[in-house]
Image (cartoon, rainbow, N blue to C red):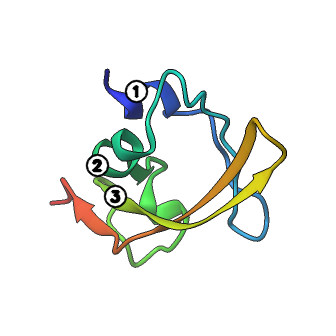
Amino acid sequence: MNVCIILRGLAITNQAGTFNIFVSPIQVSLNNLLSNCRLVVATPLSSCNVTLPSNGTLQAPIQLAGTTVIGLLVNITQFVAGVFQLIGAQ
């Protein structure tokens, strides 16, 4: 299962740059998220900063930041972005 395809387009950041996604631990393991998922900035980069190229995407691996257990069946897991790389720019 390619986790990134499932999550693509489902999360938009708020003004603080954070977002929430909901993932079933029955369908997707934490190890699968950490090894197969990337944060991707798909918008034209030049719309964020005119000094950036208009083509290409920024991609970063996700890293585990912590887990909060709420009750018997609910875990909230926090992730942070790793180092972003510019992919496909010319």
Where is residue 18 drawn, in percent x and y? 70, 62
Mark 2: secondary structure: helix
Q: Is residue 56 left or right of residue 19?
A: left
Q: Residue at x 39, y 34 (%)?
A: 4
Mark 1: secondary structure: helix
Mark 3: secondary structure: strand
Q: Is residue 68 left or right of residue 81?
A: right
- Which labelled disc corresponds to residue 60? none
Q: Is residue 55 left or right of residue 12?
A: left
Q: Residue at x 46, y 67 (%)?
A: 81
Q: How packed is label 1: few (under 14 Cα within 10 Å), some, or many (20 or more)?
A: few
Q: Quadrant of residue 37?
A: top left
Where is residue 72 drawn, in percent x and y? 78, 40
Please identify, in this view, whether the residue under mark 2 or under mark 1 is nearer the observer: 2
From what the image shows, is residue 86 above or below residue 73? Answer: below
- Which labelled disc corresponds to residue 59? 3
CA distance for labels 2 and 3? 14 Å
Please identify, in this view, whether the residue under mark 2 or under mark 3 is nearer the observer: 2
Tag 1: amino acid: Ile
Q: Residue at x 35, y 62 (%)?
A: 60
Q: Which residue is mark 1?
A: 5
